Amino acid sequence: VLIVLGIIGIIAALTIPTLVNNAEKKSYVIALKKFYTTQNNGWKALLATEGVEQLDDTTLISKVNGSYDSAATDYNLRSELQKYFKVNSIKPQSNYVIHYLDGSLAGDYSHDDLLAFPDGAVIDSGIIYKKATTSNDYSEIQSAGGHLYNTQIEQLIIDVNGFKKPNIVGRDVFFFVLSGNGILYPREGNDWAIWEPAGKWYQVNGCGTNSADNSGIATSDGTGCAARIMESGWEMNY
């Protein structure tokens, strides 16, 4: 009996951490998908309500103070955003530091104003530009099958479970861009690679250099992991 119990204990010690890890990954992906869907629906509703195709032509963008602004600090801009999103400004209650997937420091947001959602997700960075940045290679992007032609928010960083750990890019923190027509695109995904002159895809170093054997994950920053998850059928397979 003791031998059997010992074997069971060994098996449990080997399998339980894996099961917990897989459950955590699934929870991050579920939260990521919810954020992505909610964001796209909100921006789509804004454009439909105002009867325009580009965010440049909306009341929201007219509230941008200067060439760029943040809804986390600008009350007028945030009030307009609240018509389509359940969001508020918040400051972290304790140290809030984010690390890249390779363990290096991504940013310290402990004293920053952030945007918070009812489900606990927070936007750590989401500067909105008064005028969308437009590519000069529209025809090339179109011929390459791309859909990202301009960006209203060039770097949108979302922490899907807010201030809870692990606060790691590629696990619970993800990078996106918001196009001028209100569609969210993951950084270093297929459309990003066509949009960016360097053509950087997530497999270069943003979320592993080989999706088959996960080589390069340990030295990746994780910035392209939202793209990898979405292009893998919403699976965190790393």
Image (cartoon, rainbow, N blue to C red):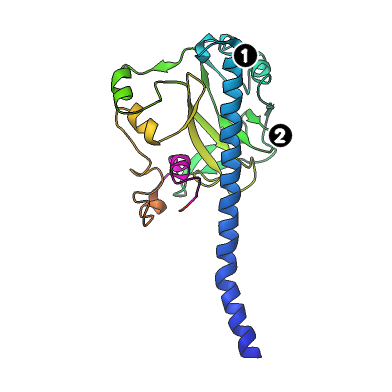
On residue 49, which mark appears?
1
Q: Is residue 69 visible in this depiction of the protein?
A: yes
In the rendered image, the vertical position of residue 73 relative to residue 236, given as above or below:
above
Image coordinates of residue 238 in percent, x first then y, are 45, 53
Residue displayed at 62% across by 34% down? 122
- Three-letter amino acid code at disc 2? Pro
Q: Residue at x 49, y 35 (%)?
A: 175
Residue 116: where, in percent of width, then height?
66, 31
Q: Earlier in the sequence, mark 2 or mark 1?
A: 1
Where residue 215 sits: x, y (%)? 36, 55
Q: Is 53 displayed left or right of 24 in the figure?
A: left
Q: Quadrant of residue 150?
A: top left
Secondary structure, mark 2, is loop
Q: Is residue 225 magenta?
A: yes
Q: CA distance from mark 2 to mark 1?
A: 23 Å
Residue extent of the magenta highlight: 220-236
